[in-house]
Amino acid sequence: MSDNLTTTRRRFLREGMWGGVLAATTAAGATLAARAKNDRLVWQIDPYKCIACGRCATHCIFTESAVKCVHSYAMCGYCDLCTGYFIPEPKDLTTAAENQLCPTGAIIRTFVEDPYFEYTIVEELCIGCGKCVKGCGAFGNGSLYLQVRHDRCVNCNECAIAAACPSQAFVRVPAEKPYLLKEFK
């Protein structure tokens, strides 16, 4: 009977150790999976650090940059003379190309009521040059700003734009909240 009891104890200890190892491995795997899900980060531009240097248009690995201008309509004054739309000292306040700041015509100006106009960004035309952002920030309220569009970005580990950004405005943010929205301060 002593032999039978010893064998049972050994078996119990061996099976208990394997069960413990299996449970620890499962717990570690679940913890790592949860951490990987929570730690998944993507590139984004901090609109409060961005100086609209124009490097987003030239340093992205894509021919058409993944960075696009976006508009915070809550901040916009719907101005007749929008400094993000018009060149400095335009000849006329019309939609003629020679009066527009955007080199691709990506901003559409629509009459609302006198003297208000709405400015809409056509993202397909936007190259992320930041000229409109710089103009809006210099004399306007800063309602235009740049953001990485995640339907276009492949989230490179070494983002060429982030490496070239002189103001360190390219930051990593959680993938669950990939956009840093500019709000009225």
Image (tube, grey):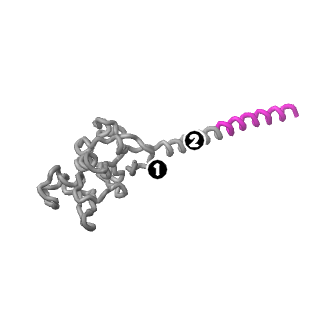
Main secondary structure type of the part rendered in magenta = helix
Q: In the image, 53: left or right of 42?
A: left
Residue 22 in view here = yes
- Closer-to-camera residue (132/157): 132
Q: Residues within 10 Å of mark 2 (few under 14, many from 20)?
A: few
Q: Is residue 81 above or below residue 154?
A: below
The kind of secondary structure element at disc 2 is: helix
Give the residue pinned by disc 2: 31
Within 10 angstroms of label 1, few (less than 14), some, or many (20 or more) residues? few
Q: In this view, does 98 lie to the left or right of 140?
A: left
Q: Earlier in the sequence, mark 1 or mark 2?
A: 2
Q: In which quarter of the image is the N terminus?
A: top right
Q: Is residue 140 left or right of residue 11?
A: left
Name the image quarter holding residue 125. Answer: bottom left
**Considering depth in this image, is 67 or 40 the residue closer to the camera?**
67
The residue segment tinted magenta is: 1-21
Query: Residue 109 placed where, x, y %?
Result: 23, 62
Q: Where is residue 184 in the image (x, y as percent from the top left)?
A: 39, 51
Q: Does the magenta stretch include residue 17?
A: yes
Position above or below: 165 against 89: above
The residue depicted at 76 percent of the width and 33 percent of the height is: 10
SS at badge 1: loop
- Amino acid at dot 2: Thr
| Residue at 25% over, 41% down | 53
Q: Is residue 68 visible?
A: no
> Tag 1: residue type?
Glu
Against 32, residue 104 (above or below) is below
Q: Position of residue 89 (x, y in %)?
A: 15, 51
Q: Name the residue under label 1.
A: 176
Question: In the image, is residue 123 part of the stretch drawn in magenta?
Answer: no
